Amino acid sequence: MIRRSLCLFSALLAVSACVGPPDRAPGKNKQKLSRPATKDARQCLSDLDKMKARYAFLAEQDFGNGCSQTASVQLYDVGIPVTNVKAVKCDVARALGEWTKDTLQPAARKAFGARVVKIESMGGYSCRNVIGRPQAAGNRSEHATGNAIDIGGFLLSNGRRVTIVAGWNGMNDEREFLRTIRGGACKRFQTVLSPDYNAAHYNHLHFDLGRGPYCR
Ligand SMILES: [Zn+2]
């Protein structure tokens, strides 16, 4: 009996050894791939797999001037497609996926009786300063390390499109929906900025995992 269990166990081991992670970079979007350097990064990728995210793990790169790409992915999907993300830290991708499930979809069901079928991002990694700040140390945006993502709008299963720029002060259902999803994001991210924060954010929600908590 013991021997049989052992055999079964080794058979399972052999099977699991054969199943490697699939190449998640579709076609021409293929990036240079490398292995995640830390246990945390490997855990994060495993969490992305569990939420059926599609992504390509990106090679670590230091671009200088406070701009770098570590433990980052090119993100295509967090269960639903996310457009326009070149690179973002895996932790940000994971938080976005969790927020999509816990906050975004329930809020869309409640407000519109529909599902969100696409998240329209306005980008993750970007080697730049906080908007409006001069070129100086300490003014680098969380985007400069891919630790942030900007969200501009959503496509719903009924064909309706909801954007921050039109909806924040738009129809009642959109206003309520957008404030609800901002509130949920504040539980997942360190800093969440909306049009309520300043004029630079009139058309997007900014989520990051840098310093915080700050929610406005
Ligand atoms: Zn931003």
Image (cartoon, rainbow, N blue to C red):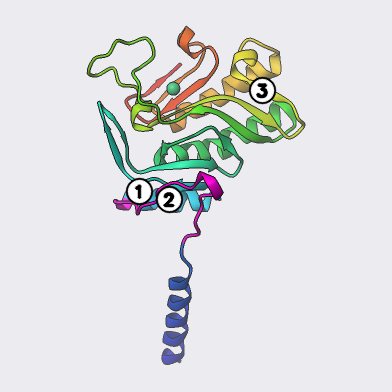
Q: Residue at x 41, y 85 (%)?
A: 6
Q: Which residue is mark 2?
A: 45
Q: Rounded to the nearest whole Å, what is the CA distance between mark 3 and mark 2? A: 30 Å
Q: Residue at x 60, y 39 (%)?
A: 81
Observer able to see residue 151: yes
x then y, percent, for residue 189:
42, 30
User: Which label belongs to residue 41?
Assistant: 1
Report if the CB atoms under discs 1 and 2 are less than 8 Å apart: yes
Disc 1 crowd rating (10 Å Cα; few below 14, some 14-19, many 20+) is: some
x then y, percent, for residue 126:
39, 27
* Range covered by the magenta-colored residues: 21-39
Q: Rounded to the nearest whole Å, what is the CA distance between mark 1 and mark 2? A: 6 Å
x then y, percent, for residue 104:
60, 32
**Sequence order check, earlier mark of 3 and 2:** 2
Secondary structure at badge 3 equals strand
Disc 3 crowd rating (10 Å Cα; few below 14, some 14-19, many 20+) is: many
Q: Main secondary structure of the magenta part?
A: loop
Q: Rounded to the nearest whole Å, what is the CA distance between mark 3 and mark 1? A: 33 Å
Disc 3 marks a residue whose amino acid type is Val
Residue extending farthest to the front is 28
Q: Which residue is mark 3?
A: 162
Quadrant hosting ligand 1: top left
- Left or right of 190 on screen, residue 107: right
Observer able to see residue 53: no
**Sequence order check, earlier mark of 3 and 1:** 1
Judge whether residue 73 is colored magenta: no
Compare residues 209 and 188 and report the one nearer the observer: 209
Compare residues 71 and 47 and report the one nearer the observer: 71
Disc 2 marks a residue whose amino acid type is Leu
Secondary structure at badge 2 equals helix
Does 145 appear above or below 27? Answer: above
Q: Residue at x 50, y 36 (%)?
A: 96
